Amino acid sequence: MKTNAEIVATARKAFNSGRTKSLEFRERQLRNFLRLFEENTPEILKALSSDLRKSKQEAVMSETAFVVGECQTLLENFKTWARPERPSKGLVNIMDELLIYNDPYGVVLVIGAWNYPIQVTLLPVAAAIAAGNCVVIKPSELAPATAQLMADLVPKYLDNECYPVILGGPKETAELLEERFDYIFFTGSTRIGKLVHAAANKYLTPVTLELGGKSPVYLDSSADIDVAARRILWGKCLNAGQTCVAPDYLLCSKEVSEKFVEHARSILKEWYGDDVQKSPDLCRIINDNNFQRLTNLLKSSKESSKIVVGGKSDPQERFIQPTILTDVKQNDPIMQEEIFGPILPIVHVNDAQEAIKFINANEKPLALYIFSQNRNMTESILNSTSSGGVSVNDTVMHLAADTLPFGGVGSSGMGAYHGKYSFDTFVHKKSILVKDLGKLGEKLSYARYPPYSDSKLNYITRMLSARLPFSFKYVPYTIVFGLGVASAILLKIVANMYEKDKLH
Amino acid sequence: MAKVERELILPSTKVSPINNDNPAVINIETSETLPVTKYDRNGCRKSASEVVSIARTAFNSCKTKNVAFRRQQLKNLLRMFDENAKALEDALKKDLGRPRQEASSFDVEFTKNDVITMLMHFEEWAKPEKPPKPLPNALDQICVYNDPYGVVLIISAWNFPITLLLGPLAGAIAGGNCVVIKPSEIAEATAQLIAELIPKYLDKECYQVYLGEVMETAELLKERFDYIFFTGSTTVGRIVHAAANKYLTPVTLELGGKSPAYIDKSVDMEMTVRRILWGKCSNAGQICIAPDYILCTKEVQDKFISIAAKVLKEWYGDDVESSPDYCRIISDKHYSRLNNFLADKKNIAIGGKSNAANRFIEPTILVNVNPNDSVMQEEIFGPILPIVIIENPHEAINFINAREKPLVIYVFTKSKTVKDMFANNTSSGNLSFNETLFHFTVDTLPFGGVGFSGMGSYHGKGSFDTFVHKKGTLERNFAAITEKCTAFRYPPYSESKTNRISIIMRPRRGISCKYLKPLLIFCLGVIVIIIIQLIYYHVTDKHLL
């Protein structure tokens, strides 16, 4: 057994050897990464089923196909993204060369979570590989079957020195965090996120923290309540509510709430049948601790609010039925923490303004969901609240659009990823100014040298405020327009010639 | 970019409250009693929590979300520069003995132009971005909002007390935040002036100046902020980062480090010497991106020294101390720290004089410096330039890579191969070929460190982006077709639904509108010609072409 220090030292040595900087090497690793999924999907699905009783459809949608899709996007684009950028030049730099290099950070630590153990562990790993880093992979010990599978599979497909997997619980993770990393990517709870951030202080390691929070839903009477109910319940029942962006609670008026509950009843019946516990499509709670926490919330809610749908649970299987609570008050225990389970409390508010106030009185959530067909209202909620991301008239789906940055703000996290943002997370943008040692450039900037004088200062002041008399922004458009004009004229001339020929 | 190592050395024992009405503030280093009015604002001193709660209330009122409000504030900031340029330059003279040309070009004019750039572009930057749509989102709207963080804290350093404070301030205002402004107490005159001027020009609730020393700063850091922008030393940066842990506040840390300059023999030595010495002597070397030490071969060193002696004489005359164009060291503590490097008189090839009375240190070049010497153990932050001998660029790269990542690496060479070697095999905040300091002025280049030299970057659009949260937003409709297209996700699950998911999730090029606009403009060009033809024909009954 190698110690953490040895594993990190090996990874650092591998990074220093420069091999991960080669684009061909990265491409090979990413292809192997894809092959890992091609050749082991059944095993992965089995592990997910063992940890969370995740059904095949959910596992494919939110884990394997999701990661494969993002990895293919990386493969298709990472060489373009890795190329040095050439930012635009001002008048003063017209003779210089400006470049922004995408430098890998070095040795990256990725700490995964247990709720989507494949996605939130391996997605950042793929991006870190594409960006040219070495990666120490730490899967969550709370999804043991998946963690073990990753520890078994990753070394078979990826470079063993560059991408080691370390297994272990809180103690081992704390030890691991004592090592020096160049970037830490963490997915998990706000509480542990703080510990990771504190550990990063020692070497001022930059971190991405993908945390959670109570993501609210505002449901307006203008929405199509049936469709809205489907989309909300889908987000809540997915992975049995153990999703960082799951809608946590619902804000709506009393009338809307009644309609919603009515639709919800029939939708849940349609989805899971009369006996939900028998349905193969609902996940189980990850462990006894979390099961206990959720049943305690249910118990305490029975006193202060009404359970209108569901409420059943079974400790044997760690099954909790999708449950809806109404008349929930702001001070109820269930409103004090992220629920992370299939329980949906409804808090009554009179209108959107009240909902905004309610949302802003709490920590900034990871996601915000607005269901409304009133464009002005949507806009006003969007502008007066702050959250990691937003879906309007749906839940969870903003996470799937990979051209949107995904991440939290405030206590729901810092940093963002997905698509190009994943790549950018793992590179340092190193700007480069290239000047030559030509006489002209030296003459133009000679005024900076002592002895100082008023005329030198005037010259510098003029240079500092020098701006191009026009913007280059419209040059391409002008050219394209000109091309259009030219080709029309050309076409006409050619046609004329052709006609003349015919006349002759 | 050492703000205050003394914050660490001295525990928070600064204030001895003699009585509550008139607490005397004693400067421990000089043992002088500072006038307490230094911390007064309009006669009443607001506590850190009061300052922050006023800012928070102002932010919650949403007035800073209004783009016109931001524009007005930026215009006022610009007016502040126009109306007080002289006063600002005088304050800098007082704090750092800074010559007018440096004060004007590095601080006043430079920052003014930052504000002008911000004014020209921020409205465009603040608009929601419309990224290309992935195919499964064809029926949806997606956009990225630029949400202000809320209440931002900007802690600045003393070496460029205006640029490093008001540059980020312009970005934070443009981003729609409220700002608590904490100037460095070490550049006392400038801090005092800023505290007087800001309330005269900017909204008093949204943008407050908080003055104070170690203890006051510690108090301030206990408050909750939504973003912290810090410029200063790595040691204090770490304290700020630790304080940010409580509320997981994101931070930008603009720190320092030992920025090396590599010179090879291919260069025009006269030009190289001028550029390096300019970077080292401006502000008497008290610049986070000043070249800290030189790596070169022995022959290059000899050439460098002979030209440097000539250049320095040309710039400052025979007696540097009497030149009006040379700054002084900020404080006695920094003066004695620097003077210690010169104490043993070892390796001094040029300069070496100093004068404690006015904190003068002559531009000094040390030759054949041993990497283990004390001058090579910390950021120098003064006009002392050690030269370490290496044999070739490989050795220089190894030397650099064996140390913490610097804020910038300077490479002087004409060789393309050497340039590529450095660009590809070293890591630093920035990299600059054949020039010092200038990369700071290019606002399309992100400026910031990596590793111990900092995290986050700014300048130009980066200054705006630093202070906004990019909120990804997806908007879907309730149309039956949308619901039908996505209904496969609902239970009861089935094999055929699963297959459809795998197919849909395969990445395809999204619908990119990138080429739509040029295409339309091209068509417009064609149409314009056709119309002209038709009109011409209609009017003259003849074909134009």
Image (cartoon, coloured by chain):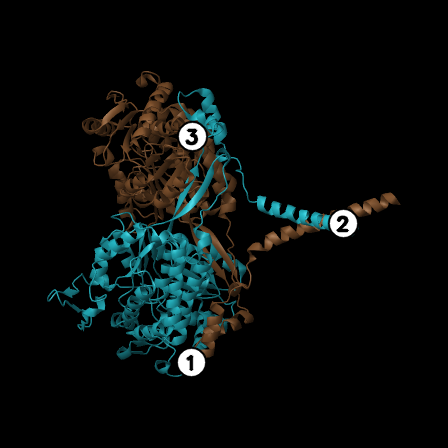
* Circle 2 or circle 1, nearest the eye: 2
- The image shows residue A120, relative to residue B316, as above or below, that is above
Secondary element under disc 2, as helix, strand or loop, is: helix
Instruction: Looking at the picture, tell me which residue is in the foreground, A385 or B340.
Output: A385
**Residue A64: mark:** 3
Q: CA distance from mark 3 to mark 2?
A: 65 Å
**Residue B96: mark:** none
| Residue type beneath disc 1 | Lys
Callout 2 touching callout 1 (CB < 8 Å): no
Rendered cyan, the chain in question is: B
> Dividing the image into 4 quarters, which one contains the C terminus of chain A?
top right
Secondary element under disc 3, as helix, strand or loop, is: helix
- The image shows residue B9, relative to residue A329, as above or below, that is below
Locate residue A36, reporting x and y percent: 44, 31
Q: Residue A345 is drawn in which quadrant? A: top left
Q: Are marks 3 and 2 on the same chain?
A: no
Q: CA distance from mark 2 to mark 1?
A: 77 Å
Q: CA distance from mark 3 to mark 1?
A: 69 Å
Residue at mark 1: chain: B
Question: Which residue in the structure is indicated by mark 2?
Answer: B537
At horizontal 73% and vertical 48% (from top left) the residue drawn is B534
**Residue B313: mark:** 1
The residue at the far front in this view is B539
Dot 2 or dot 1, earlier in sequence:
1
Instruction: Looking at the picture, tell me which residue is in the foreground, A140 or A319.
Output: A319
Chain A pictured colour: brown
Q: Are marks 2 and 1 on the same chain?
A: yes
Instruction: Looking at the picture, tell me which residue is in the foreground, A13 or B433.
Output: B433
